[in-house]
Image (cartoon, rainbow, N blue to C red):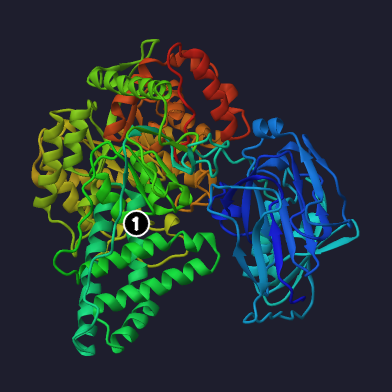
Amino acid sequence: MSSSKLTLVAPATGIVTLLSDVPDPVFAGGTLGEGIALDPLETTLHAPCDGEVVQCAKTRHALSLRSEQGVEVLLHLGLDTVELQGRGIDLLVEVGQRVKAGDPLCRFDPELLAEQASSLITPLVVTDDAGWRLRLEAGATGERVERGEALMSLTPDETSVETTTEHTGPWHERRVTLALEAGLHARPAARVRAIVKRHDAEMRLEHGGAEARGDSVSALMNLGLAEGDEVVLRARGDEAEAVLAAAAELLTTPEGVEPPNAAAPDAAVSAPVAEGEIAGLVASPGLAIGPLVAVSLPLPAVPHDGRGAAVEREALRAALERVGRSLESAREQAERQGQRAEADIFEAHLAWLDDPGLLEAAMARIEAGRSAGQAWREALDDEAEQLRATGNALLAGRVADLRDLQRHVMAEFAEAGSAPLPDVPEGAILVADDLSPSQFVDLVERAPAGLCLKGGGTTSHVAILARARGIPCLVAMGEALEGVVGECAVLDAHEGRLEPAPDEARLSTIRDALRRDAERREAERAEAFEPAITRDGREVEVAANIGDSGEARLAAESGADGVGLMRSEFLFLGRPSAPDEAEQCHEYQTSLTALGGKPVIIRTLDIGADKQLPYLRLPEVPNPALGVRGVRLWHDQAALLDTQLRALLGVAPLDALRIMVPMVSEVAELAWVRERLEAVVSELGVAERPRLGAMVEVPSAALCAASLAEQADFLSIGTNDLTQYTLAMDREDPRLAARADVLHPGVLRLIQATIEGAAGRCPVGVCGAAAGDPLAASLLVAMGVDELSVEPARVAAVKAMIRRLDAASLARELPDLLAMPDAASVRRRLAEHHESAFETTTITPERIPS
């Protein structure tokens, strides 16, 4: 390997984007390697360094260079451009050609790509950085760079020791036929390499006399494999059979088309901003008008010197325990309230808190004479600096979380007079360097209109929280945000820009848009208590999903027709023992009372998979989602079920109560619960019996809906789990979130089977996230569901959508929709239907994770 430094320059004038912010999990997760990305503002890509062209995709959307130092660099024009099959792209080089930095590599039609590809963002990735240290040289994310400016440098890593495991033994072989519609392009090639790296084996792919190592992305792409090609997989080593099986499964499984993910915002500015405006990355879309208010959040003041090592060591341990209890309590509360994003963040902070390396670093400083608070500050300062120095954008993006933990612990030692959070006016657009998640949560209580951050990224925890709360937010705005002022600024978090001094015409336009949105919401709220009847005369109940009796009151105030799902597990979480019968009964009764006689569906305890109880630990299994959860738990914990049934039977009026059983896979399970219910009814001498229903969350329940409906008084489709189990995609895996779409035709066919099976026997509702997705909800109504259950804040909007819907008209399109190849096609078709069918209001095809 040459010892010289390698600099990669911008292949075009454009807007810089961190690789971790690219809306594609393979690039963002570093599966292909480290690098950077560019949103090009030119129509030609040029060589980022001197080197040899070693790979050109048949579809012309990607090519690789090998530098004089032996480093391979992948240039990938846009995202999902492989689907274009080369249309709109002209290659100007060929494999084996030597080029100089700045030489043209390919030309492209920006209008065609912008219309037919998911994004023009162009990643520049070092596909094999072994022995090299990478450093980003570009300016702040979101800033413009000129063609030829330095983007990234690589220097030899003198500390790196390159080791190659020699695999011996016989070669094992498999022949497969490639089922990847777009061939073996960058994304599947990266996944093949990841498979090889996870196994103790060497693998090669052979086709047409050519051979490629399984751990080389460029070599794999150079095979030029297309759908239908026969490939020979050969492997040797201790895990040869395992690597062959995993690779064969990948190569013989069609990729499918990932649906658009509205929950993941655009990762770059869509166009250059005008003079006087400041660009940023869209972390949470929306519009806002308000004064710009700079927010400075200093760390708590703590004593510098300690009172002796023994005293300070004990003080630090005690503080860490207190902060740990506080974080655990906050995590449990967030989980009870259904704030999954916030719960995950608190869990990540708990993991940092338990890091022995951080504790050792702090203790070493205590031995050197520092106080506990100062020692913790210095230890986390060093850790934050190390994260930044890695050059890994994903790790650097977690510095805000580390700062949050630093602040939490230092607050335990804060001296009198430490500055509290600043007092900011309501309706302001807040400007800050960066925010930790807890600072964000505190500032949100001041009702800001929007948020602008110098740092951060679109995948940061603050970005997630801003989207969850609907607060417009731009991140990675850089030093251009320093000292910015504005008495009446416009934050356009659709287009990715802050306008500190808009003219009156612009202000008038934004105010009109905001007024129309507010008027729409107000009109919806005014009619929230009216029934939801479609234009063709079908009445649909709109109920609320709740977690506790407090949310039951919100549901009643929102105009909900009842409660479609009360998650009883909230009462069992965050405590050392299960609640007794009296405590449960009180909470259930409070919820029924709040709804004033409207139906309330309470789901029996649903524990397992992603939810566990400290006093009811289940055995660890390879796949908890397929283990003992829901109704399956009751056979081993019948006493726990009987206690809950007694508590439920203690409420009044019983004719308003509905009991729902989760994770039913066959009618025998529901029949067993009914037997237990009848036994408790006899034991208590209760005259009335509440209705008993089942959740349809697994394919077997949907396919056997007719027999299930003979035993059930109602069915409720849990679209979150039904989608997960139908598509075999873990709902907790962020890499699959965009593809786990309830509008996949396979999921829709199971929903249709449920509705048809229950017809004439019992009503069918939907209590999953799909009920709140405008496009999915309208289709569910057209398919024939009797009830939609959504979060209380969505009740008014969903009722308004139903009143605008001609369900019969949409139902006529159902055969065509079910015959479509994927969820993305269904979403496009539904969006087109709504745009033409609704005269005054169109439903944006939002992407709400299922």
Residue 617 rendering spot, x and y as whole percentages: 30, 66
Residue furthest to the right: 209
Residue 606 rendering spot, x and y as whole percentages: 31, 51
Residue found 38% across the figure and 48% down from its top: 483
| Quadrant of the snapshot with the N terminus | bottom right
Residue 210 rendering spot, x and y as whole percentages: 88, 60
Q: Is residue 175 visible?
A: no
Q: Is residue 837 above or below residue 564?
A: above
* Left/right of residue 602 with respect to residue 727 in the rendered view: left
Residue found 75% across the figure and 46% down from its top: 45
Residue 673 rendering spot, x and y as whole percentages: 28, 46
Q: Is residue 677 visible?
A: yes
| Quadrant of the snapshot with the C terminus | top left
Q: Is residue 492 above or below residue 57?
A: above
In the rendered picture of this protein, how many numbered marks are placed on residues?
A: 1
Please name the residue that numbered disc 1 is placed on.
436
The answer to which of 439 and 423 lies nearer the viewer is: 423
The answer to which of 111 and 101 lies nearer the viewer is: 101
The answer to which of 329 and 456 lies nearer the viewer is: 456
Residue found 61% across the figure and 28% down from its top: 819
* Left/right of residue 300 with respect to residue 497 in the rendered view: left
Amino acid type of the residue tagged 1 in the rendering: Ser
Residue found 52% across the figure and 32% down from its top: 749
* Left/right of residue 271 with respect to residue 475 in the rendered view: right
The answer to which of 777 and 47 lies nearer the viewer is: 47
Does dot 1 land on a helix, a strand or a loop? loop
Asked which quadrant contains residue 714, the reply is top left
* Left/right of residue 244 with respect to residue 106 in the rendered view: left
Packing grade of label 1 (10 A; few <14, some 14-19, many >=20) is many
Q: Is residue 17 above or below residue 83?
A: below
